[in-house]
Amino acid sequence: MDPKALNAIVHDREAAYYDDRFLIDYDGRIGAEVRRDLGALLGEVPRARRALDVACGTGYLAVGLAASGIAREVHATDLSVRMVERTAENAARAGASLTVALADAERLPYADAAFDLVVARAALHHLPDPAASLREIRRVLEPGGIAIVTAEPTPGGERQVAAVVGVAVRAVGLLNKLRGRTQDPEHLTWELASMAANLHTFTPDEIESTARAAGFEQVEVSKASLAWILALGINYYLVGEFDGLARNRWVRRGARASADAAAAFDRAITDRFLPASWRHTIQAVMR
C-alpha cells in the first residue's frame, strides 16, 4: 500500500483514541505546557505573528500555540481527515482559536514566506519523503522565521521502547492465556498497520544534513527524553489492549500523573546529565 494512504487510514482510525494512548489533555494546562517546552528548547518563549503546525495530529502544538498566546494566528494541517476534525474539536475544548486544513506535508497549500513560525511534532517519521517536507516548511517560512521539529524517534530509542513494551506484551499474553482469551485478528491487524505507519527513525546527523539540504542555514539539533517515552510506550500498548483503562478516569489520571513525573525527571536529569546516546528523541531548531 502507498505509505501516504496507509498513514491516512491508520490515523483516521487512531484519531478516536490517540489522546488517550498518548496521554494528551486539552484543558487549561495545554498552553502552559507548550510555552514551557518551546521556551526550554529556544532559551526563551517565542512570539509569532502567524504560525503553522504541520502534520498536527490531534493538535497538541497548534492548540498550545493558540491557547498560550504565543502566536496571534495559528494554522494546522494533517493528511488525516479525522485528525483535522479532532484538532478543531480539541481547540474548541481548550477555548483556542485556529484554522485547520487537510493537506499533504509535501505540498503545503500556502504561499511562500507565509509564516514566521512553523512546527512539526512527531511528524517526519510518518512522511515518505522527510526531505520534501522540510523543503516545503522552508518555503512557507519567512526570512528570519523559526522552524521547530520535535519528538522524532531514534533507532536506539525505538529498540529500548520495544524491549520495555515487550515485557508488557508478554505479561498480557500470559494473562490472556490464563483467562482463555484469544487475540482478536482485526485488532492485531490494526496494531501491525499502526507500526507500519512509522516509516523512519533518525540520527541527529541525518536530521541536520536533511535540514541543510532543504535550505536552512542554521540548524541546532539535540536529543531529549527517556523516561517519558518509555511511559508513553507502555500506556500506548496497554490502552490498545484494554480500552476500558482510558474510560476509567482514575486510571487515566494516574497514568497521566506518571507520564508527567517521567517528563519532569527527563527535564531535570535525563536532558541535563545523562549521555545523549541514552535519549530517545530528536529535536531541531532551524532558521
Image (cartoon, helix red, strand yellow):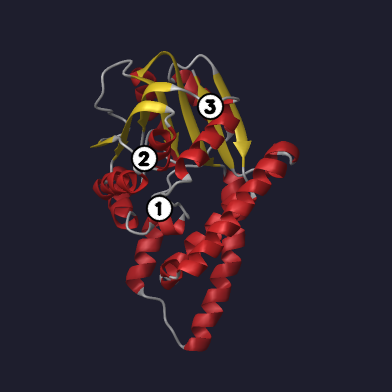
Q: Is residue 33 above or below residue 209?
A: below
| Closest to the observer, 197 or 137 | 137
Say which residue label 2 marks.
56
Which image quarter: residue 281? Answer: top right
Give the residue number, with chain letter if any, for mark 1.
196
- Tell me the crowding category of disc 1: few under 14, some 14 to 19, or many 20 or more residues within 10 angstroms, Cα based: some
**Which of disc 2 and disc 1 is earlier in sequence?**
2
Q: Kindly identify the residue that appears in the image at 40 percent across and 37 percent down.
A: 67
Rendered view: 262 above or below 30? below
Q: Position of residue 28 (x, y in %)?
A: 45, 46
Secondary structure state at the residue bearing disc 2: loop
Query: CB under 8 Å between callouts 3 and 1?
Result: no
Kindly identify the amino acid type of the residue bearing the numbered disc 3. Answer: Val
* Label placed on residue 45: 3
**Alpha-carbon neighbours of circle 2 within 10 Å: few (<14), some, or many (≥20)?**
many
Say which residue appears at 53% left-offset and 81% top-offset.
Answer: 175
28 shown above or below 35: below
Question: How far is mark 3 from mark 1, CA to CA?
Answer: 36 Å
Circle 1 SS class: helix
Q: Earlier in the sequence, mark 3 or mark 1?
A: 3
Residue 223 percent coordinates (x, y):
62, 36
Q: Residue at x 47, y 17 (%)?
A: 216
Which of the two marks, 2 or 3, is nearer to us in this view?
Answer: 3
Foreground: 8 or 52?
52
